[in-house]
Image (cartoon, helix red, strand yellow):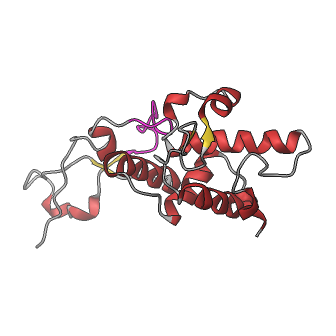
Amino acid sequence: MAMLAFLAGDDWETSPAQQAGYTSPVTAGADLSTALPVCQPPALFPEHMVGQQEPLFLNIVLPTHVDHDGAVVEAASVRVRALGGTLTTEEAIAVLKVAGWPDALIPQALAVAWCESKWSPYALGDSGRSAGWFQLNIATWFQYAGEDAEHWADPVTNARVALATYRYDIGRGYRPWTQWSCGFAAHN
């Protein structure tokens, strides 16, 4: 009979990214104990075996709800921080959702960010003033959005600032995407 091996009690409530010391604004301080109940799977130990042998894993942590977008964002953040590179389509969409972008605007946001940086969170403009996958002016827009400019390369932070910038344009009656040189990409 094949047995499944699980590590009982060893870091089931932390992700590999958290174990490596990374905390993103998305997951910092998250209480995972409520989302991950401790269960005992009786199907693995038929009644006639109870008491005959001590199972190796009594407490298996099974998620009742997996925040797919949050998990994708965390993995993407760790990967681009360690290796550089660009976000994948799935990662870029997940980041936008976690950052609060409305579903209807996600295709436009993807087009603008692709034109600006090819979805590279560590992209820097020629002058060094515009940064991140949305190429936002660090001195202006991070302060306006109430975000720490030191986190310009965090994909979610950059996307939140981009959303605040987009809303700035709309709130003042400007054509959407006015603040981006690639704003035209949203309208194609």
**Which residue appears at 58% of the width and 36% of the height?**
129
Identify whether 117 is placed above or below 18.
below
User: In the displayed image of the protein, which residue is found farthest to the front?
Assistant: 127
Q: Quadrant of the N terminus?
A: bottom left
**Which residue appears at 49% of the width and 29% of the height?**
150
User: In the displayed image of the protein, which residue is found farthest to the bottom?
Assistant: 1
Residues drawn in magenta = 23-37
Q: Is residue 162 visible?
A: yes
- State the image quarter where residue 162 is shown: top right
Please tell me which residue lies in front, 19 or 147: 147
Identify whether 49 is placed above or below 165.
below
- State the image quarter where residue 93 is shown: bottom right
Please tell me which residue lies in front, 28 or 54: 28
Q: Give the total number of marks visible in the rendering.
A: 0
Dominant secondary-structure state across the stretch colored magenta: loop
Q: Looking at the picture, how far across and down is residue 59, in whole percent? A: 25, 46
